[in-house]
Amino acid sequence: MMNEQIVAIFESHPGEFISGQRLSQMLQCSRTAVWKHIQTLRSQGYDFEAAPRAGYRLRHKPDVLDVNLVTSRLQTAFMGHSLHYLEQTDSTQTVARELAENGAREGTVVIAEQQSSGRGRMGRKWHSPPGKGIWMSIVLKPRIPIQLAPQLTLLAAVALSRSIKRIAGVNVGIKWPNDLLIGGKKVCGILMESNAEDERLQYVIAGIGISVNLTEQDYPESLREIATSLRMASGQQISREQLLVDFFQEFEHLYNVFHDEGFSPIRTMWEANSISLHHPIRVTTAKGVVEGTAEAIDEFGALIVALPEGTVVKIYSGDVQLLAT
Ligand code: BTN
Protein backbone atom coordinates (compact mmCIF):
# COMPACT_ATOMS: atom_id res chain seq x y z
CA MET A 1 0.00 0.00 0.00
CA MET A 2 2.72 2.41 1.05
CA ASN A 3 4.75 1.52 -2.06
CA GLU A 4 1.77 2.37 -4.24
CA GLN A 5 1.37 5.70 -2.43
CA ILE A 6 5.02 6.54 -3.03
CA VAL A 7 4.69 5.76 -6.74
CA ALA A 8 1.52 7.88 -6.91
CA ILE A 9 3.34 10.84 -5.31
CA PHE A 10 6.18 10.66 -7.82
CA GLU A 11 3.77 10.27 -10.71
CA SER A 12 1.98 13.46 -9.71
CA HIS A 13 5.38 15.28 -9.67
CA PRO A 14 6.94 14.08 -12.94
CA GLY A 15 10.68 14.73 -13.24
CA GLU A 16 10.84 16.44 -9.82
CA PHE A 17 13.07 15.66 -6.88
CA ILE A 18 11.17 15.10 -3.64
CA SER A 19 13.09 15.09 -0.39
CA GLY A 20 12.99 12.22 2.07
CA GLN A 21 11.74 14.70 4.68
CA ARG A 22 8.81 15.75 2.51
CA LEU A 23 7.95 12.18 1.64
CA SER A 24 7.98 11.17 5.28
CA GLN A 25 5.57 14.03 6.07
CA MET A 26 3.27 13.16 3.20
CA LEU A 27 3.20 9.49 4.15
CA GLN A 28 3.34 10.08 7.90
CA CYS A 29 6.19 7.69 8.47
CA SER A 30 9.88 7.93 9.36
CA ARG A 31 12.58 8.76 6.81
CA THR A 32 14.05 5.31 7.40
CA ALA A 33 10.71 3.79 6.42
CA VAL A 34 10.69 5.94 3.25
CA TRP A 35 14.19 4.75 2.39
CA LYS A 36 13.18 1.10 2.92
CA HIS A 37 10.17 1.49 0.62
CA ILE A 38 12.32 3.13 -2.03
CA GLN A 39 14.71 0.16 -1.79
CA THR A 40 11.82 -2.28 -2.20
CA LEU A 41 10.57 -0.39 -5.23
CA ARG A 42 14.07 -0.40 -6.69
CA SER A 43 14.18 -4.19 -6.35
CA GLN A 44 10.93 -4.26 -8.35
CA GLY A 45 12.49 -2.36 -11.23
CA TYR A 46 11.71 1.28 -10.28
CA ASP A 47 14.67 3.48 -11.07
CA PHE A 48 15.08 6.29 -8.50
CA GLU A 49 17.82 8.86 -8.77
CA ALA A 50 18.99 10.01 -5.33
CA ALA A 51 20.71 13.37 -4.90
CA PRO A 52 22.08 14.78 -1.65
CA ARG A 53 19.63 17.32 -0.15
CA ALA A 54 17.31 17.27 -3.21
CA GLY A 55 15.94 13.81 -2.42
CA TYR A 56 14.62 11.28 -4.92
CA ARG A 57 13.40 11.49 -8.46
CA LEU A 58 11.60 8.70 -10.32
CA ARG A 59 13.49 8.18 -13.56
CA HIS A 60 11.81 5.08 -14.87
CA LYS A 61 8.89 2.87 -13.94
CA PRO A 62 9.08 -0.83 -14.70
CA ASP A 63 7.07 -1.99 -17.65
CA VAL A 64 4.07 -3.47 -15.83
CA LEU A 65 2.12 -6.05 -17.75
CA ASP A 66 -1.29 -4.78 -18.78
CA VAL A 67 -3.41 -7.83 -17.98
CA ASN A 68 -6.64 -6.08 -19.01
CA LEU A 69 -5.20 -5.48 -22.46
CA VAL A 70 -4.33 -9.17 -22.77
CA THR A 71 -7.77 -10.28 -21.59
CA SER A 72 -9.62 -7.85 -23.85
CA ARG A 73 -7.73 -9.05 -26.95
CA LEU A 74 -7.91 -12.78 -26.27
CA GLN A 75 -9.54 -14.75 -29.05
CA THR A 76 -9.09 -18.21 -27.59
CA ALA A 77 -11.65 -20.74 -26.43
CA PHE A 78 -9.82 -21.63 -23.20
CA MET A 79 -6.18 -20.54 -23.16
CA GLY A 80 -5.63 -17.69 -20.73
CA HIS A 81 -9.30 -17.30 -19.83
CA SER A 82 -8.34 -17.70 -16.21
CA LEU A 83 -5.29 -15.48 -15.84
CA HIS A 84 -3.60 -15.06 -12.44
CA TYR A 85 -1.22 -12.13 -12.42
CA LEU A 86 1.29 -11.83 -9.58
CA GLU A 87 3.75 -9.01 -9.00
CA GLN A 88 6.15 -11.45 -7.46
CA THR A 89 6.30 -15.10 -6.52
CA ASP A 90 8.90 -17.77 -5.86
CA SER A 91 7.98 -19.81 -8.95
CA THR A 92 4.84 -19.71 -11.07
CA GLN A 93 5.18 -23.53 -11.32
CA THR A 94 4.40 -23.87 -7.61
CA VAL A 95 1.39 -21.55 -7.80
CA ALA A 96 0.00 -23.26 -10.91
CA ARG A 97 0.44 -26.69 -9.33
CA GLU A 98 -1.56 -25.58 -6.27
CA LEU A 99 -4.30 -24.24 -8.55
CA ALA A 100 -4.34 -27.51 -10.52
CA GLU A 101 -4.56 -29.52 -7.30
CA ASN A 102 -7.59 -27.42 -6.42
CA GLY A 103 -9.32 -28.12 -9.71
CA ALA A 104 -8.18 -25.20 -11.90
CA ARG A 105 -9.50 -25.59 -15.41
CA GLU A 106 -7.47 -26.22 -18.52
CA GLY A 107 -5.77 -23.14 -19.90
CA THR A 108 -5.40 -21.45 -16.50
CA VAL A 109 -2.30 -19.27 -16.60
CA VAL A 110 -0.17 -17.95 -13.76
CA ILE A 111 2.11 -15.12 -14.79
CA ALA A 112 4.52 -13.25 -12.57
CA GLU A 113 6.31 -9.98 -13.09
CA GLN A 114 9.23 -11.42 -11.15
CA GLN A 115 10.25 -14.79 -9.67
CA SER A 116 12.57 -15.14 -6.72
CA SER A 117 13.26 -18.86 -7.32
CA GLY A 118 12.51 -19.40 -11.00
CA ARG A 119 13.23 -23.02 -11.85
CA GLY A 120 14.86 -24.39 -14.99
CA ARG A 121 15.38 -27.92 -16.22
CA MET A 122 17.81 -30.23 -14.47
CA GLY A 123 17.63 -28.34 -11.19
CA ARG A 124 18.95 -25.13 -12.72
CA LYS A 125 17.82 -21.64 -11.74
CA TRP A 126 15.89 -19.45 -14.17
CA HIS A 127 16.84 -15.78 -14.18
CA SER A 128 13.50 -13.91 -13.87
CA PRO A 129 14.06 -10.18 -13.23
CA PRO A 130 11.05 -7.81 -12.92
CA GLY A 131 9.11 -6.20 -15.73
CA LYS A 132 11.06 -7.56 -18.69
CA GLY A 133 10.07 -11.13 -19.29
CA ILE A 134 7.17 -13.48 -19.60
CA TRP A 135 7.43 -15.91 -16.71
CA MET A 136 4.35 -18.08 -16.77
CA SER A 137 2.92 -21.52 -16.07
CA ILE A 138 -0.05 -23.02 -17.85
CA VAL A 139 -2.33 -25.72 -16.46
CA LEU A 140 -3.06 -28.36 -19.11
CA LYS A 141 -5.23 -31.46 -18.91
CA PRO A 142 -4.28 -33.30 -22.09
CA ARG A 143 -6.32 -36.32 -23.05
CA ILE A 144 -3.28 -38.46 -23.85
CA PRO A 145 -1.48 -41.44 -22.32
CA ILE A 146 1.27 -40.47 -19.90
CA GLN A 147 4.10 -41.67 -22.16
CA LEU A 148 3.14 -39.05 -24.76
CA ALA A 149 3.45 -36.12 -22.34
CA PRO A 150 6.96 -35.15 -23.63
CA GLN A 151 5.39 -34.33 -26.99
CA LEU A 152 3.79 -31.31 -25.35
CA THR A 153 7.21 -29.83 -24.73
CA LEU A 154 7.92 -29.94 -28.44
CA LEU A 155 4.50 -28.51 -29.18
CA ALA A 156 5.16 -25.57 -26.84
CA ALA A 157 8.52 -24.96 -28.51
CA VAL A 158 6.88 -24.85 -31.94
CA ALA A 159 4.16 -22.46 -30.73
CA LEU A 160 6.76 -20.18 -29.17
CA SER A 161 9.01 -20.08 -32.22
CA ARG A 162 6.08 -19.29 -34.54
CA SER A 163 4.69 -16.60 -32.29
CA ILE A 164 8.05 -14.97 -31.69
CA LYS A 165 8.75 -14.87 -35.40
CA ARG A 166 5.45 -13.08 -35.99
CA ILE A 167 5.64 -10.58 -33.15
CA ALA A 168 9.37 -9.87 -32.81
CA GLY A 169 10.33 -10.60 -36.42
CA VAL A 170 13.29 -12.76 -35.43
CA ASN A 171 14.06 -16.37 -36.31
CA VAL A 172 14.22 -18.66 -33.35
CA GLY A 173 15.75 -22.12 -33.65
CA ILE A 174 14.69 -25.03 -31.46
CA LYS A 175 17.40 -27.07 -29.79
CA TRP A 176 16.08 -30.44 -28.66
CA PRO A 177 14.04 -30.79 -26.67
CA ASN A 178 12.94 -27.36 -25.67
CA ASP A 179 15.51 -24.59 -25.80
CA LEU A 180 14.80 -21.69 -28.08
CA LEU A 181 17.91 -20.00 -29.37
CA ILE A 182 18.74 -16.92 -31.39
CA GLY A 183 22.28 -16.81 -32.79
CA GLY A 184 23.24 -19.69 -30.50
CA LYS A 185 22.03 -17.90 -27.35
CA LYS A 186 19.07 -18.99 -25.29
CA VAL A 187 15.99 -16.76 -25.35
CA CYS A 188 13.24 -19.08 -23.99
CA GLY A 189 13.03 -22.15 -21.83
CA ILE A 190 10.27 -24.66 -21.26
CA LEU A 191 9.79 -26.79 -18.17
CA MET A 192 7.05 -29.41 -18.26
CA GLU A 193 6.00 -30.98 -14.99
CA SER A 194 3.40 -33.74 -15.04
CA ASN A 195 1.24 -35.20 -12.36
CA ALA A 196 -0.13 -38.71 -12.74
CA GLU A 197 -2.18 -41.06 -10.62
CA ASP A 198 -2.33 -44.79 -11.35
CA GLU A 199 -0.51 -44.21 -14.65
CA ARG A 200 -3.13 -41.66 -15.69
CA LEU A 201 -2.09 -38.13 -16.51
CA GLN A 202 -3.96 -35.76 -14.20
CA TYR A 203 -2.46 -32.49 -15.33
CA VAL A 204 0.66 -30.98 -16.83
CA ILE A 205 2.15 -27.65 -15.81
CA ALA A 206 3.83 -26.03 -18.80
CA GLY A 207 6.36 -23.55 -17.44
CA ILE A 208 7.53 -21.03 -20.01
CA GLY A 209 10.15 -18.36 -19.64
CA ILE A 210 10.63 -15.82 -22.44
CA SER A 211 13.36 -13.23 -22.08
CA VAL A 212 11.53 -10.40 -23.81
CA ASN A 213 12.97 -6.98 -23.03
CA LEU A 214 16.06 -7.72 -20.97
CA THR A 215 19.18 -5.74 -21.81
CA GLU A 216 22.73 -6.96 -21.34
CA GLN A 217 22.87 -5.25 -17.93
CA ASP A 218 19.88 -7.29 -16.79
CA TYR A 219 21.92 -10.49 -17.00
CA PRO A 220 24.52 -11.57 -14.49
CA GLU A 221 28.00 -11.91 -15.95
CA SER A 222 27.70 -15.70 -15.98
CA LEU A 223 24.76 -15.60 -18.43
CA ARG A 224 25.86 -12.86 -20.84
CA GLU A 225 27.67 -15.24 -23.18
CA ILE A 226 24.86 -17.78 -23.35
CA ALA A 227 21.61 -15.83 -23.08
CA THR A 228 19.86 -13.17 -25.12
CA SER A 229 16.47 -11.46 -25.27
CA LEU A 230 14.01 -10.62 -28.02
CA ARG A 231 14.84 -6.97 -27.54
CA MET A 232 18.58 -7.56 -27.88
CA ALA A 233 18.04 -9.72 -30.97
CA SER A 234 15.50 -7.50 -32.71
CA GLY A 235 16.80 -4.11 -31.59
CA GLN A 236 13.36 -3.03 -30.43
CA GLN A 237 11.15 -3.12 -27.36
CA ILE A 238 8.61 -5.93 -27.73
CA SER A 239 5.08 -5.72 -26.35
CA ARG A 240 4.70 -8.53 -23.86
CA GLU A 241 0.91 -8.20 -24.13
CA GLN A 242 0.93 -8.67 -27.90
CA LEU A 243 3.27 -11.65 -27.63
CA LEU A 244 1.09 -13.28 -24.96
CA VAL A 245 -2.13 -12.86 -26.93
CA ASP A 246 -0.50 -14.30 -30.05
CA PHE A 247 1.14 -17.15 -28.18
CA PHE A 248 -2.09 -18.19 -26.41
CA GLN A 249 -3.81 -18.38 -29.78
CA GLU A 250 -0.98 -20.28 -31.47
CA PHE A 251 -0.62 -22.71 -28.58
CA GLU A 252 -4.35 -23.40 -28.46
CA HIS A 253 -4.42 -23.97 -32.21
CA LEU A 254 -1.53 -26.48 -32.10
CA TYR A 255 -2.96 -28.15 -28.99
CA ASN A 256 -6.23 -28.72 -30.85
CA VAL A 257 -4.36 -30.04 -33.91
CA PHE A 258 -2.44 -32.38 -31.59
CA HIS A 259 -5.63 -33.78 -30.06
CA ASP A 260 -7.38 -34.09 -33.44
CA GLU A 261 -4.54 -35.36 -35.64
CA GLY A 262 -1.86 -36.60 -33.25
CA PHE A 263 1.80 -35.66 -33.00
CA SER A 264 2.73 -36.07 -36.67
CA PRO A 265 1.93 -32.49 -37.86
CA ILE A 266 3.60 -31.03 -34.77
CA ARG A 267 6.66 -33.16 -35.42
CA THR A 268 6.91 -31.83 -38.98
CA MET A 269 6.71 -28.24 -37.73
CA TRP A 270 9.25 -28.97 -35.00
CA GLU A 271 11.67 -30.44 -37.53
CA ALA A 272 11.29 -27.39 -39.76
CA ASN A 273 12.35 -25.12 -36.90
CA SER A 274 14.99 -27.37 -35.39
CA ILE A 275 18.65 -26.43 -35.26
CA SER A 276 19.70 -29.76 -33.72
CA LEU A 277 18.87 -32.05 -36.62
CA HIS A 278 21.54 -33.22 -39.08
CA HIS A 279 24.14 -31.64 -36.87
CA PRO A 280 26.95 -33.15 -34.81
CA ILE A 281 25.94 -33.01 -31.18
CA ARG A 282 26.99 -34.04 -27.70
CA VAL A 283 24.17 -35.13 -25.41
CA THR A 284 24.64 -35.31 -21.68
CA THR A 285 22.16 -37.72 -20.12
CA ALA A 286 21.79 -39.17 -16.63
CA LYS A 287 23.53 -42.29 -17.96
CA GLY A 288 26.48 -40.58 -19.60
CA VAL A 289 27.60 -38.59 -22.62
CA VAL A 290 26.77 -39.51 -26.22
CA GLU A 291 28.27 -37.92 -29.33
CA GLY A 292 26.88 -38.34 -32.82
CA THR A 293 24.59 -36.76 -35.37
CA ALA A 294 20.99 -35.88 -34.54
CA GLU A 295 18.91 -37.55 -37.25
CA ALA A 296 15.28 -37.12 -36.34
CA ILE A 297 12.76 -37.27 -33.54
CA ASP A 298 10.59 -40.31 -33.11
CA GLU A 299 6.82 -40.45 -32.61
CA PHE A 300 7.29 -39.88 -28.85
CA GLY A 301 9.55 -36.87 -29.29
CA ALA A 302 12.76 -38.73 -28.43
CA LEU A 303 15.92 -37.65 -30.26
CA ILE A 304 17.42 -40.23 -32.60
CA VAL A 305 21.18 -39.96 -32.67
CA ALA A 306 23.44 -41.80 -35.14
CA LEU A 307 26.72 -42.78 -33.50
CA PRO A 308 29.99 -42.72 -35.49
CA GLU A 309 30.21 -46.53 -35.48
CA GLY A 310 26.88 -46.74 -37.27
CA THR A 311 24.50 -47.62 -34.45
CA VAL A 312 21.53 -45.48 -33.52
CA VAL A 313 20.42 -44.51 -30.00
CA LYS A 314 17.28 -42.82 -28.75
CA ILE A 315 17.58 -40.10 -26.17
CA TYR A 316 14.53 -39.39 -24.02
CA SER A 317 15.99 -36.73 -21.78
CA GLY A 318 19.25 -34.86 -21.75
CA ASP A 319 21.13 -31.70 -22.57
CA VAL A 320 22.25 -31.13 -26.15
CA GLN A 321 25.35 -29.24 -27.14
CA LEU A 322 25.84 -28.40 -30.81
CA LEU A 323 29.35 -29.26 -31.93
CA ALA A 324 31.33 -27.40 -34.56
CA THR A 325 30.97 -28.93 -38.01
C1 BTN B 1 14.77 -24.34 -18.90
O1 BTN B 1 15.11 -24.03 -20.04
O2 BTN B 1 15.59 -24.81 -18.12
C2 BTN B 1 13.33 -24.15 -18.49
C3 BTN B 1 13.08 -22.79 -17.93
C4 BTN B 1 11.64 -22.56 -17.53
C5 BTN B 1 11.43 -21.24 -16.83
C6 BTN B 1 9.98 -20.96 -16.58
S1 BTN B 1 9.70 -19.28 -16.08
C7 BTN B 1 8.06 -19.67 -15.64
C8 BTN B 1 8.09 -21.03 -14.99
N1 BTN B 1 8.34 -20.92 -13.58
C9 BTN B 1 9.51 -21.45 -13.24
O3 BTN B 1 9.98 -21.48 -12.08
N2 BTN B 1 10.12 -21.96 -14.33
C10 BTN B 1 9.32 -21.80 -15.52
Image: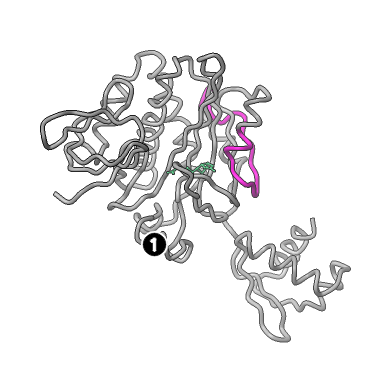
Residue found at the very far left of the displayed protein: 309
The residue at the far right in this view is 28
Q: Is residue 224 left or right of residue 41?
A: left
Residue drawn at (56%, 17%) of the image: 197
The residue under the point 18% across, 41% down is: 279
Name the one closer to the observer, 249 or 311: 311
Residue 214 location in percent, x, y? 46, 58
- Against 216, residue 185 (above or below) is above
Q: How is the image coloured?
A: one colour
Q: Residue furthest bottom?
A: 53
- Rendering coords of residue 230 (x, y %): 39, 52
SS at mark 1 in the image: helix
Q: Is residue 79 left or right of residue 317?
A: right
Residue occupying the point 33% across, 20% down: 263
Residue type, label 1: Arg
Q: Is 88 inside the magenta-drawn segment?
A: yes
Query: Which residue is labeled 1 in the image?
Result: 224
Q: Residue at x 75, y 58 (%)?
A: 4
Q: Quadrant of residue 95?
A: top right
- Image quadrant of residue 236? bottom left
Looking at the image, residue 59 sits to the left or right of residue 226; the answer is right
Image coordinates for residue 96, horizontal then vertical, percent: 61, 33
Residue 238, relative to residue 319: is it above or below?
below
Q: Is mark 1 within 8 Å of ligand 1?
A: no
Q: Magenta residues?
A: 76-96
Q: Nearer the viewer, residue 172 or 314?
A: 314
